[in-house]
Image (spheres, rainbow, N blue to C red):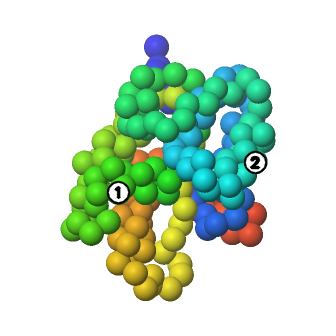
Amino acid sequence: MPATPRPPRVLVLGGARSGKSAFAENLLTEAPTVRYLATAVLDPADHDFADRIAVHRDRRPEHWTTVENIEPATVLATGAPATLLDDIGTWITARLDAREAWDAPRGTVGPDCDALVEAVEVYRERLVIVSPEVGMGVIPATRSGRLFRDEIGMLNQRLARACDEAYLLVAGLPIRLK
C-alpha cells in the first residue's frame, strides 16, 4: 500500500504590508482545524502594535486555535492539525532579545534556527510559515538592523529549502517561487 503523501510545507515571504499574512491565512481556509502559532510578544505600552495584533486576531476564523508566545520548534514537534506560523521576524527578534545577542557575534541564535528548521523538515501536517523578506532594501545603518537582516535572510534561505512551496508577496500579489 503506497504511503499517503505529506501535505505541503509552504513559506510565504513579503515586505511590510505586502499581504503575506492574509495570503497565508487564505491557504488554510479549507482546513477543518488550524493551529495558529503567534510569535509576537505584546508590549502593553505599545498601542500601535497591539492594534496590529488585534487586526490579525479578528481576521482569523473562530474555529482556529491560537497559541501565543511560543517556541515553534517545540510546538511543531507535538504534531497536530494544519498549522500557520506567523511570523518568523517577530520570533527571531524575541530570540535575539532572549539570548541578549544584539551585540553578540552573528550566529548566536543559530541553535534556535537549527531547531526550527529541523522541526519544519520533519513536520507531517500542512504547515504555512510567514516571514518578512528584508533583503531588498538598503543596508541598514545600525549594527542591530544589519544583524536582524543577516540572521533572518539566512534563516529564510534554510526554510525555503525545507519547504515544498514558497511565495513572495509584492503589493498584495503572490509570486510563486517554488
Name the residue at 23% across, 66% down. Answer: 104
Residue 103 visible to an observer of this rendering: yes
Name the residue at 42% across, 74% down. Answer: 145
Q: Are marks 1 and 2 in contact (CB under 8 Å)?
A: no
Label 1, residues with CA under 10 Å away: few <14, some 14-19, many ≥20: many
Between 41 and 117, the residue placed more toward the observer is 41
Residue 147 in the image: above or below residue 10: below
Residue 174 visible to an observer of this rendering: no
Per the rendering, the mark at residue 84 is none
Name the residue at 60% across, 34% down. Answer: 36
Label 2, residues with CA under 10 Å away: few <14, some 14-19, many ≥20: few
Element under disc 2:
helix
Relative to residue 172, is residue 6 drawn left or right? left
Element under disc 1:
helix
Looking at the image, tell me whether mark 1 or mark 2 is earlier in sequence order: 2
Residue at the far front in the pictured view: 45
Tell me the kind of residue under disc 1. Answer: Leu
Q: CA distance from mark 1 to mark 2?
A: 26 Å
Between 73 and 50, the residue placed more toward the observer is 50
Residue 122 position within the rendered picture, expressed as x and y whole percent measured from the top left: 37, 33
Name the residue at 69% across, 65% down. Answer: 18
Per the rendering, the mark at residue 96 is 1
Residue 130 in the image: above or below residue 68: below
Relative to residue 74, is residue 16 drawn left or right? right
Residue that carries the numbered disc 2 in the rendered image: 55
Residue 130 position within the rendered picture, expressed as x and y whole percent measured from the top left: 57, 51
Residue 10 position within the rendered picture, expressed as x and y whole percent measured from the top left: 55, 46
Residue 135 position within the rendered picture, expressed as x and y whole percent measured from the top left: 48, 75
Tell me the kind of residue under disc 2. Answer: Val
